[in-house]
C-alpha cells in the first residue's frame, strides 16, 4: 500500500514520519489535545472527553435523569463542557467557578 504522512507531516526516513504540532502517530493522523490548567499542568480531554481534532475535545453530555428520582426536577442536559471538558453541566443550574454569579438570563 501507499504510506503517507498526514496533516502536514513529513517523511524523514523509510516508514518514518515527523508530525506537525497537534498530531502524532506513525502516520500523523492522530490529533492531540493539550489544555493548560490553572496550576500550569497540560492535560488532554478530561472526564471521558474525546480528542476530535487538534486541541478540540468532544465532551460527554447526556440527558439528565434527575427527574426519575425527583418529580419536580427539570429535564435537561448534564455532563461536561469547556475546551478540556472540565466544567460540569447541571440540569438544575450552572457552574460558576469564579463565584461571579454571571449566569445567562433566565437561568
Image (cartoon, rainbow, N blue to C red):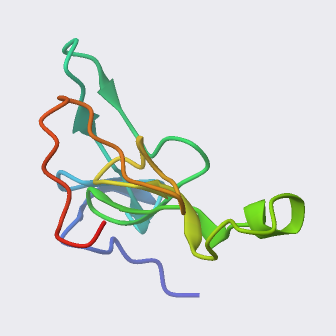
Q: Is the residue 5 above or below the residue 79 in the image?
A: below
Q: Quadrant of the C terminus?
A: bottom left
Q: Position of residue 16 (x, y in %)?
A: 39, 53
Q: Position of residue 53 (x, y in %)?
A: 34, 68
Name the one closer to the observer, 72 or 84.
Answer: 72
Residue ranking furthest to the bottom: 1
Q: Position of residue 95 (x, y in %)?
A: 35, 44
Residue at (17, 51) in percent of width and height: 21
Residue ranking furthest to the right: 69
Residue at (71, 68) in percent of width and height: 72
For residue 81, side relative to residue 9 (left or right): right
Name the one closer to the observer, 78 or 81.
Answer: 78
Residue at (22, 12) in percent of width and height: 39
Quarter location, residue 30: bottom left
Q: Is the residue 46 above or below the residue 11 in the image?
A: above
Residue at (27, 39) in percent of width and height: 96
For residue 41, side relative to residue 64 (left or right): left
Residue ranking furthest to the top: 39
Give the number of marks: 0
Q: Position of residue 18 (x, y in %)?
A: 27, 51
Q: Quadrant of the N terminus?
A: bottom right
Name the one closer to the observer, 104 or 40.
Answer: 104
Q: Is the residue 97 above or below the residue 22 in the image?
A: above
For residue 81, side relative to residue 101 (left or right): right
Amino acid at each position: 500500500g501507499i504510506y503517507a504522512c498526514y496533516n502536514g507531516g513529513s517523511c524523514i526516513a523509510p516508514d518514518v514520519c515527523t508530525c506537525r504540532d497537534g498530531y502524532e502517530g506513525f502516520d500523523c493522523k492522530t490529533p492531540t489535545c493539550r489544555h493548560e490548567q490553572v496550576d500550569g499542568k497540560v492535560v488532554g480531554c478530561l472526564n471521558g472527553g474525546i480528542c476530535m481534532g487538534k486541541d478540540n475535545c468532544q465532551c460527554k453530555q447526556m440527558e439528565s435523569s434527575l427527574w426519575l428520582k425527583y418529580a419536580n426536577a427539570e429535564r435537561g442536559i448534564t455532563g461536561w463542557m469547556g475546551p478540556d471538558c472540565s466544567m460540569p453541566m447541571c440540569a438544575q443550574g450552572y457552574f460558576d467557578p469564579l463565584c461571579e454569579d454571571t449566569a445567562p438570563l433566565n437561568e
